[in-house]
Image: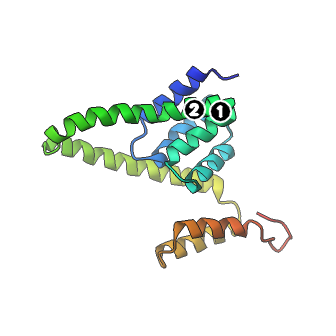
């Protein structure tokens, strides 16, 4: 059985080094949870991430909550959730105290610029990993293409796209199989 302190400290570490939101967290989660500790399969991680994205709240917190619950039930949920949000709370308090004083500092501006660029690289890496494990076959390419067209060309609601994509899983393909 997984120790609650280990769950808390692991998610504290993940929360501490996750800049740019939940998408930037995925490569760290994959490295720790799937490859190093083998607590989850890559498919399970993507499922938790997908559910975390579709439920209200912050993706990183939702994913941590789902993983914590899977590993230790309600106590694991609380431990993982507190772990992932604790660094943000600590850093926000410190930054809020210093930000007003140093926000116009050129070095701070350069640092934020560098952080933004690194977050873009993390997000691209995450999208690539999700693409490799999530797009399987022509049907998935069609769902992706349809979602992209609805989102980018018609500015369709992301919620409606997720609902439509989920509904397509119930439509059998030409072989009679569902997604």
Few, some or many residues within 10 Å of mark 1 (<14, 14–19, 20+): some
Q: Are marks 2 and 1 in contact (CB under 8 Å)?
A: yes
75, above or below 110, in the image? above
Q: Secondary structure at mark 1?
A: helix
Q: Residue at x 53, y 66 (%)?
A: 158
Q: Position of residue 165 (x, y in %)?
A: 65, 67
Q: Residue at x 25, y 38 (%)?
A: 96
Residue topped by disc 1: 74
Residue topped by disc 2: 78
Q: Secondary structure at mark 2?
A: helix
Q: Residue at x 51, y 24 (%)?
A: 9
Residue 179 falls left or right of residue 149: right
Few, some or many residues within 10 Å of mark 2 (<14, 14–19, 20+): some
In which quadrant will I find the N terminus?
Answer: top right
Q: Position of residue 124 (x, y in %)?
A: 46, 53
Numbered disc total? 2
Q: Residue furthest right?
A: 176
In which quadrant will I find the C terminus?
Answer: bottom right
From mark 2 to mark 1, how far is it between C-alphas?
6 Å
Q: Residue furthest bottom?
A: 154
């Amino acid at each position: 059985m997984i120790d609650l302190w280990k769950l808390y400290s692991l998610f504290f570490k993940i929360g501490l080094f996750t800049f740019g939101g939940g998408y930037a967290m995925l490569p760290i989660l994959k490295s720790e949870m799937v490859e190093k500790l083998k607590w989850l399969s890559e498919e399970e991680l993507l499922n938790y991430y997908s559910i975390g994205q579709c439920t209200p709240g912050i993706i990183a917190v939702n994913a941590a909550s789902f993983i914590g619950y899977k590993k230790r039930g309600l106590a694991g949920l609380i431990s993982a959730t507190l772990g992932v949000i604790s660094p943000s709370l600590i850093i926000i308090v410190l930054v809020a105290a210093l930000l007003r004083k140093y926000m116009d500092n050129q070095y701070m501006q350069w640092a934020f610029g560098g952080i933004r660029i690194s977050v873009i690289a993390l997000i691209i890496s995450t999208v690539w990993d999700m693409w490799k494990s999530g797009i399987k076959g022509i049907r998935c390419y069609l769902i992706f293409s349809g979602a992209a067209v609805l989102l980018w060309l018609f500015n369709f609601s992301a919620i409606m796209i997720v609902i439509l994509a989920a509904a397509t899983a119930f439509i059998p393909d030409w072989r009679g199989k569902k997604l």
